Image (cartoon, rainbow, N blue to C red):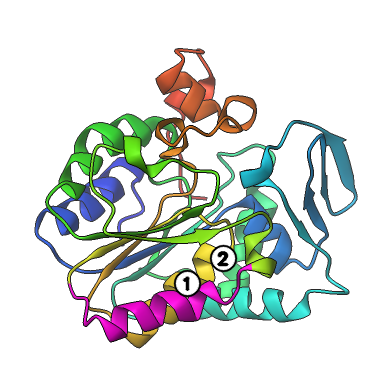
Amino acid sequence: MLKDYKKSFDFLLEKIKNKENFAFTRFSDGELFILQNKTVVLAQNHYVTGDVKGSNIYTAEEQKEFHPEQHGFYRDKLMESYTHNQDYYYKGICTSTDGHVGKENFDWMIDCHGGDHENLTYANLLINANYKRFIEEMVPLFVDRQILYVVNENANVNKLPFHIDHSFIIGSNCMINNYDTVDEVKNHISKNNIQDAIVLCSAASLTNYVIYECFRNNNNNTFLDIGSCLNPLLDLEGWKHTRGYLTSYWLNSGSPFGRQVDQWG
């Protein structure tokens, strides 16, 4: 896959326009730290990533906890989904453009993967400077497609500008508490013989499991890891505290994330 930030967005956009099925799954900073077997906690008013602790506001849909000594199974499944290679299975990773990630962690992800690969691309592909295009060019393409959505229980999908044919509801810390959603999605697709649908996922690291297991099992649908991209349209509030690219677009906050063009490396 192209390593140019904007051309890579074009690449996925054209696939959706042409109804060519693929999977796009993101291994962002949270997934990076879990892969590195570090403690990750997003609580109501603080965060922990490894030895780093700080204050921030995280609403229910954003809260999660990963403790290496308790949750080894989930880390192993995440690693399995990351190292898996398959045609049209695209994996977005962190780059050093995000200062808190840095070149050292980018190199770690490449090494962990066994080297660079044509199916590796940007974790931030649908956000930051590409977010305006996601909302204004990609989302309208969902209108005439069958859409399944893995989404938080606090979300109101009725205000979306496209119809949701079926929702899979998850809660807080879904990568641990809602792992059974993987089979729920897989079985729903199989039982109903669903083909050429778009499966949207906004479920933290659970998204990686769903996309990996379902696309590996049946590549006749498109799977998109959209993270928090639609949260401003879902009556959710947490993005106002933690997502600069969203406040830039929806609140005109001037956040530099709204202009950030990622570079490979």
In this orientation, which residue lies closer to the viewer: 2 or 126? 126
Give the main secondary structure, helix, strand or loop, of the magenta stretch: helix
Report if residue 101 is visible in the image: no
Q: Residue 144 at what x, y percent from top left?
A: 11, 51
- Residue position marked by numbered label 2 in the rendering: 206
- Residue position marked by numbered label 1 in the rendering: 210
Looking at the rendered structure, the secondary structure element under dot 1 is helix
- The correct choice, above or below, for 163 with respect to 149 in the image is above
* Quadrant the N terminus occupies: bottom left
Determine crowd level at label 2: few under 14, some 14-19, many 20+ residues with C-alpha closer than 10 A: many
Position of residue 23 in the picture relative to residue 115 (left or right): left
The three-letter code of the residue at mark 1 reads Val
Q: Which portion, as a residue range, is magenta? A: 178-195
Q: Residue 81 at what x, y percent from top left?
A: 53, 76
Position of residue 125 in the picture relative to residue 34 (left or right): left
C-beta proximity under 8 Å, tags 1 and 2: yes
Q: Residue 52 at what x, y percent from top left?
A: 87, 44
Determine crowd level at label 1: few under 14, some 14-19, many 20+ residues with C-alpha closer than 10 A: many
The three-letter code of the residue at mark 2 reads Leu
